[in-house]
Image: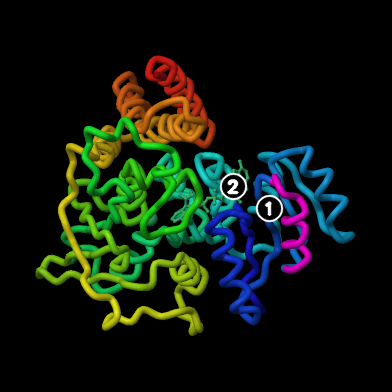
Amino acid sequence: MTLRLALLGATGSIGRAALEVVRHHPDRLSVTTLAAQGRKPEALAALARETGARLVAVTDPAAAAALARALPGGVEVAVGAEGLIAAATHPEVDRVVAAVVGAAGLPPVHAALAAGKGVALANKESMVVAGPLLNALAAASGAEIVPVDSEHSALHQALRGGRPAEVRQLLLTASGGPFLRRDAASFDAIRVEEALAHPTWSMGAKITIDSATLVNKGLELIEAAHLFAIPPERIGVVVHPQSIVHSFVEFIDGSLLAQLSVNDMIFPVQYALAYPERWENTFPRLDPAALGTLEFLPLDRARFPAVELARSALAAGQSAPAVLNAANEEAVHAFLDRRIRFPAIVETVRRVLERHDPAPVGSLEAALAWDAWGRARAREALAALAP
Ligand code: NAD
Ligand code: MG
């Protein structure tokens, strides 16, 4: 019997890594459902043929018609937000690879956990928007959330080296992005192309911009706090430009355990699918002797205020992280559309959070309402910030 997967965000960077892992382990993994925006229906149909998927979900109704024509008979087409949930909760799915980008990934993760399906979680935004809610659902249904984010995969692995009470702190590594050594005085002049040129990882556009502002590390701090039930003051960040050490756990006796691998997301994806096992593979391995120098340096909080912004949103709690995430998504889109300058991304998030009084997020509907509130306030802030 193979582990039957729902691949949400199948055409993206993580989706492609997941497909590589599936191709590598045909005896262990199979794909039951696929979901993507559907901008390239032909490519999605080809994936469905290759994997033998039974259901393909797309966001765009126009794409659905083209997809239906291109698919082999008997494959179901599902559309829109409901289609995404149908893909996540299909009765013949055992584990969901959540690799949609943004808060759009929350409803299917919520539905998967409610249905008792394990989730390999790349979509960190869903944990940021509704972490306590998702944890409660998982606890109630017995479904497990295993992180795909490389830092959290490293922490998940290193945490197996001790008991929860023996953990002193989690230390997330951050590459620092393309502007690690750039003078903040010239941040105003950063072009979209420069921000999209990440030095160590090849990823989708949104997370690449988040890595340049370091909002990504802020989101990861919130994600780690929820995944591992650790308060924010016990989560640190250390800059590590080579992205080889994927994070550290420091234990109370002064020992640090880290996880290292080649910086390719196939490793954390495979870990999340194999867990609680480990599977052999023939992926290119890390050769420490060939690495040369690995650097570790403190984060410059003055040039990159995003991590502290996320820390204070997490401390404020309730709806604040959802609002932070929503404002950031809107601001990143505006930057990619060349409507605002680079520093205005984090400035937008700061302004929206300033106007926010945190309120409870007790349901999916409440989470989505706060997401919408954050987006609306962000659009107002963005209009004021446009040059
Ligand atoms: P991407 O932009 O490359 O791919 C996104 C995928 O989601 C695509 O298949 C797209 O069609 C689909 N999608 C987008 N909006 C959708 C919607 N509304 N409904 C259905 N499908 C939709 O993004 P990515 O880089 O693969 O990132 C995916 C997620 O994984 C993000 O949450 C990101 O933060 C996280 N992540 C990515 C990496 C990485 O290396 N790329 C690492 C860690 C975490
Ligand atoms: Mg990461």
Q: Residue at x 22, y 48 (%)?
A: 181
Q: Mark 1 falls on what kind of element?
A: helix
Q: Which residue reaches farthest left? A: 253
In the rendered structure, does residue 28 fall within the stretch colored magenta?
no
Tally of numbered tags: 2
Q: Quadrant of the C terminus?
A: top left
For the residue carrying disc 1, how many other residues have a C-alpha within 10 Å: few (<14), some (14-19), or many (20+)? Answer: many
Q: Which residues are magenta?
A: 38-50
Q: Residue at x 46, y 65 (%)?
A: 265
Q: Earlier in the sequence, mark 2 or mark 1?
A: 1
Q: Look at the magenta stretch and give its main secondary structure.
A: helix
Name the image colouring.
rainbow
Q: Residue at x 30, y 53 (%)?
A: 229
Nearer-the-camera pick, 260 or 77: 260
Residue 326 visible in the snapshot: no
Quadrant for residue 342, please give it. top left
Give the percent coordinates (x, y) of residue 97: 56, 59
Task: Tell me whether circle 2 and circle 1 mark residues in contact (CB < 8 Å).
Answer: yes
Task: Name the residue that disc number 2 marks.
Answer: 108
Residue 48 placement, left or right of 1: right
Residue at disc 1, CB closer than 8 Å to ligand 1 = no
Task: Name the residue that disc number 1 marks.
Answer: 87
Q: Amino acid at mark 2?
A: Pro
The image shows residue 272, relative to residue 277, as above or below, that is above
Residue 284 placement, left or right of 82: left
Nearer-the-camera pick, 44 or 90: 44
Q: Quadrant of the N terminus?
A: bottom right
Give the percent coordinates (x, y) of residue 21: 56, 72
Quadrant for residue 261, please give it. bottom left
Residue 362 disc label: none
Q: Mark 2 falls on what kind of element?
A: helix
Give the percent coordinates (x, y) of residue 379: 46, 21
